[in-house]
Image: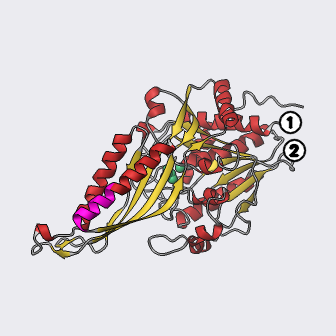
Amino acid sequence: MAHSASNLQINSDRLWGTIHETAQFGATPKGGVRRLTLGPEDQKVRDWFRAACEAAGCTVHVDTLGTLYAIRPGRDMTMDPVGLGSHLDTQPTGGKFDGILGTLSALEVVRTLNDAGITTDAPLCIIDWTNEEGSRFAPAMMASAAYAGDFTTEDILSRRDADGISVGEALDAIGYRGKEAVGAVKLQNFVELHIEQGPILEAEGKTIGVVEHGQGVIWYDGVVTGFAGHAGATPMPLRRDGLAALSEVVLAVEALATALGPNAVGTIGEAVISHPSRNVVPGDLAFTLDLRSADAGVLDRLDEAVREKIAAIATRRNVAVELTQVWRKLPTHFNGKLVDAVETATRALGYSHRRITSGAGHDACNLANVMPAAMIFVPCKDGVSHNELEDATQADCTAGANVLLHTVLSLAGIAD
Ligand code: HGY
Ligand code: MN
Ligand code: MN
């Protein structure tokens, strides 16, 4: 008997409960979450998530990079599953919703279908992608990037954090280096729910963002080599001050991105003086550079202009600046049919919405290179994210999860 699921809704209180229950793993005093990938807190939330998926009738697979794939059977198990999910790792000063909303909403979709006794034609696969944030190990979205073939598994396993621990060692330390090859679990498509992490939806009073595009990204690791000297005895004209040079670089990145804006952004998120001391002129520093634009041409122009300006500053200040590119991702254009499916589900549910481009990178941006993929955004308070103040409303999270539910049902089909 065909089941009318058109008025099916997720269990809002249950979803809201899981968001706050899992926020305990890495909870910070300011109400945020610090759950760095492959650390002890990530292990706890992974254990929680795997147990919840198994209790919901899913079979959980773990691949070599620790990504979790929980498969809910469909009527026709010869069909590739519809993929839905996001990530559970956070920034060092992260919030309760970035990544977590999408992964837990995927679990809630399965729980809702179980409650309703609905079987889909195609299986579903809910996913927690390892290391989306890229804070502890670069690049960001590394596991979905490996799944999409942008990096080899060996390359990713060898990436090291600031303490010299490799991804492989961190996976072994928490018992999540799985047996399955990356890419072994096939998907027919992938849909990701995420907070917008920007101000547009809230400013326009829209509940849902139907995401069409994602920004391209270029990441560099940088090293400044100046010359340390006595803070009192070294005359100003003789200094080769690495921090002063980097300070000019920071302001140049800001000016160049602003000049190429509004479709360009540039950030130096990390800057470390090698041997800091209050009475030593800084010599050597390490830093990171993040450049983004939704327009490939603008991104290339920003990249070139920044590198030229850095070279000019280095020459004038008689310091060396070395840039190593660690990640380069072209802008994402999500699959038109899937984007339409998100919009159709949104309209049917009666939510206000608008089409939008993602400023942040997401696992769906990598999946979009190898299969039809789409994203659903909901507002976050003041557009704030990557900050412990990150917040969202239960109503908006529920709306996003309902759109996810109905988008997935339209893609997977309903058997009974
Ligand atoms: O960097 C990003 O855009 C994502 O938050 N990892
Ligand atoms: Mn995220
Ligand atoms: Mn993030």
Tell me the residue that label 1 is attached to.
Answer: 416
Task: Please state the horizontal and vertical placement of residue 50, each as a whole percent of the image.
Answer: 68, 58
Tell me the residue that label 2 is attached to.
Answer: 75
Q: Which quarter of the rendered picture does the C terminus lie within? A: top right
Residue at (76, 54) in percent of width and height: 186
Q: Mark 1 CB in 8 Å range of ligand 2?
A: no
Residue at (84, 47) in percent of width and height: 79
Q: How is the image coloured?
A: secondary structure
Judge from the rendering whether residue 214 lies leftward or rightward of residue 288; answer left or right. Answer: right
Task: Please state the horizontal and vertical placement of residue 332, each as a whole percent of the image.
Answer: 58, 44
Which quadrant holds residue 248? bottom left
Q: Amino acid at mark 1?
A: Asp
Q: Nearer the viewer, residue 113 or 270?
A: 270
Residue at (10, 73) in percent of width and height: 232
The span picked out in magenta is 309-318
Task: Please state the horizontal and vertical placement of residue 70, each as a whole percent of the image.
Answer: 73, 54
Total marks placed: 2
Residue 37 is one of the magenta-drawn residues: no
Question: Mainly helix, strand or loop, the magenta region?
Answer: helix
Residue 165 visible in this rendered orientation of the protein? yes
